[in-house]
Amino acid sequence: MSTYSLTCINDTESTWTFGLFQKLPNFEGLVSLAWKRSAVPPKGQAILQWDVVFNVSITDYKQTNGVGVYTSEQVLDTNLGQVWECQFVDGCQQLVPAADQSGVTGDELLIRNRSGRLGNLGVGMSGSSAVLQPDVEDNASAQFVVKPKYYLGLFNRLKKGEVIKSNVAVGPINLVYGSGRTEMTATAAMAGATISLTHD
């Protein structure tokens, strides 16, 4: 298991929330969530860390003051190439390994909705939901090609699980951890009258 880290440096005069999120190759119909985040004061820094442990998840959607946030109801560790089912057991939706493990390749995860209800079904990493397919109908499936790309943006405010849309104030920038690299530094700085976000 590899552990990755991102040092976030705020070299501006304002407090910013550094928000890390993921996108997957088959992005049609999928929603990116605020996956890792930290508010960083002026001239301060924070470290975001995660392990490459993949997850499947069921989430619940709530909207407060116009901000949509998905909270995880269940997050389970998984290996890639597995099939899961969302079932309605003991009065709630639950994820269980599917008896039929066909229909996926080694870099995919498949979640079949067999709960009799709409399901917000997702995948993530390091214990948190990162990308989901909302409102999957009963007897339908959510299939994910789990080759995540990491993106970082600056936000005025950001809650974990918040939907990433037009709320990015600066960025986003793509973070590529190449061949064996596990650490990176991103810096927010003033560039004249504007704020820039760069990484090493």
Image (tube, rainbow, N blue to C red):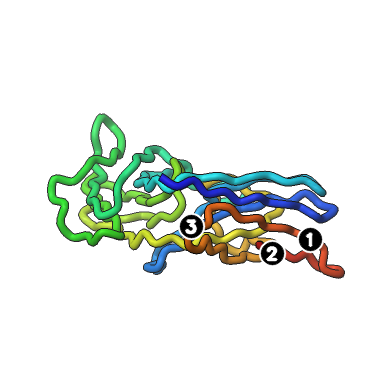
Residue at horizontal 61%, vertical 51%? 6
Q: Nearer the viewer, residue 154 or 126?
A: 126
- Identified by mark 2, the residue type is Thr
Q: Is residue 74 visible?
A: yes
Pointers 2 and 1 in contact (CB under 8 A)? yes
Q: x, y percentage for residue 154?
A: 68, 57
SS of the residue under disc 3: loop
SS of the residue under disc 1: strand
Q: Around disc 1, counting alpha carbons within 10 Å, would you say few (fewer than 14), some (14 to 19), or many (20 or more)? A: some
- Identified by mark 1, the residue type is Ala
Residue at horizontal 13%, vertical 45%? 99
Q: Relative to 168, is 95 on the left or the right?
A: left
Q: Nearer the viewer, residue 72 or 177?
A: 177
Q: x, y percentage for residue 88?
A: 25, 38
Q: Nearer the viewer, mark 1 or mark 3?
A: 3
C-alpha separation, residue under disc 2 versus residue under disc 1:
8 Å
Please say if 194 is above or below 141: below
Nearer-N-terminus badge (2/1)? 1
Instruction: Return the residue at label 1.
Output: 189
Instruction: Return the residue at label 3.
Output: 180
C-alpha separation, residue under disc 1 versus residue under disc 3:
28 Å
- Identified by mark 3, the residue type is Gly
Q: Around disc 3, counting alpha carbons within 10 Å, would you say few (fewer than 14), some (14 to 19), or many (20 or more)? A: few
Specify the label residue 96 is tagged with: none
Q: Nearer the viewer, residue 74 or 81?
A: 81
Q: Is residue 62 visible?
A: no
Q: Nearer the viewer, residue 100 or 191?
A: 191
Residue at horizontal 45%, vertical 59%? 31
Nearer-N-terminus badge (1/3)? 3
Nearer-N-terminus badge (2/3)? 3
Specify the label residue 198 is tagged with: 2
Q: Relative to 185, is 13 on the left or the right?
A: right
